Amino acid sequence: MTSPVTGPATDADVPGWVRSLGLPGLVDIHVHFLPDRVMRKVWAYFDDASRHYGVKWPVAYRLPEDERIEVLRSLGVLTYAPLVYPHKPGMAEWLTSWALDFGARVPEAVPTATLYPEPGVADIVASALDSGARCFKSHIQVGAFDPRDDLLDPAWGLLAEAGVPVVVHCGHGPVPGDYTGLDVFEKVLARHPRLTAVLAHAGMPEFDAALELVARYPRTYIDTTMVGTPFSEAMSPLPPDWPARLADVADRVLLGTDFPNIPYEYATQLRAIASWAAADDRLGDAFLRAVLHDAPARLLGVR
Ligand SMILES: [Zn+2]
């Protein structure tokens, strides 16, 4: 059998490539949808990326919301977690209610929620769980908060108990924040070792530290968001033995992309993942099926 290891050349090739792997479609645990006003601010920030990040960052899918939903549908993304995140107090609750509503009105979207260290955070998290939130997002770089904050402790506890995954941007990429660093987030894991934590961007640029956490905490995962794409390789290259090292943690790697705020086609991420699968005999198509569908589907409770 010819192995579809090179991945899809363009977005138009994605559905056929996914079918050739024997999959019904993709499950993406890391995409972003936000209220329009907030999304426009995010895009304005990326327009100024040269100043913020030292690179140009042209957002590839700068489209109205209904068209972005349609793009994911045409790519064959069966289920996704549309992640929202606050950058200041007083935002988490209304962003969460927006995301819960988005999950209710868009068939492919799971209801999601977010959290921020502020009074009442445990109630916000408990109420989001009651309302059916199936994935949380915690953005430590943009939020510029300490994940070890006492206010968050009961919230992490509730998430650990519920077994609901939280996608945590705790790495230093693309620019370090006051409390980024996997050593900082590890303190949370040490207190809540049963937390289902997804290290966004595989901890970029601390890939080694991320793999160590995955090895140490059985409920910790990495997502592939932007990892290994030519854009990221120019800033934060993967270690040369990356595919070999994934073989030990192959069931804890999850498809994530950062759609729509990526400076390249969606297919680019899939080619990066396909190149890892091709580079080690222990990975191959079975790895692709796990990463692109089975593992994220299990975590998001897709039946
Ligand atoms: Zn993201």
Image (tube, helix red, strand yellow):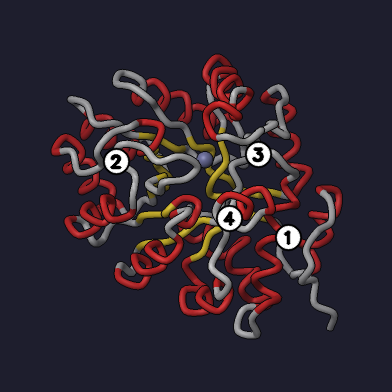
Mark 1 CB lies closer than 8 A to ligand 1? no
- Give the residue at mark 3: 262
Element under label 3? loop
Going from the N terminus, do you reach mark 2 or mark 1 first?
Answer: 2
N-term-proximal mark, 3 vs 1 = 3
**Label located before the other in sequence (2 or 4):** 2
Circle 4 SS class: loop
Labels 2 & 3 near each other (Cβ < 8 A): no
Q: Amino acid at mark 4?
A: Val
Quadrant containing the C terminus is: bottom right
| 66 on left or right of 132 | right
Q: Which residue is mark 1?
A: 271
Name the residue nearer the viewer: 253 or 55.
55
* Residue indicated by mark 2: 179
Residue type, numbered disc 3 = Ile
Q: Comparing marks 2 and 1, which lies closer to the viewer?
A: 2
* Image quadrant containing the N terminus: bottom right
Spatial CA span between label 2 and label 3? 24 Å
Q: Quadrant of residue 106?
A: top right
Q: Dot 4 corresponds to which residue? A: 227
Estimate the spatial distance between the alpha carbons at disc 4 and disc 3, rounded to whole Å.
Answer: 12 Å
In the structure shown, which secondary structural element does the residue marked by tag 1 occupy?
A: helix
On screen, residue 101 above or below 147: above
Circle 1/circle 4 CB separation < 8 Å:
no
**Image coords of residue 56 (percent x, y):** 66, 33
Q: Is residue 151 above or below residue 48?
A: below
Could you tell me the amino acid type at mark 1? Arg
User: What crowding class fits label 3: few (fewer than 14 Cα within 10 Å), some (14-19), or many (20 or more)?
Assistant: many
Amino acid carrying mark 2 in the image: Tyr
User: Horizontal and vertical percent for residue 251?
Assistant: 49, 71
In the rendered structure, the answer to whether residue 169 lies left or right of residue 18 reads left
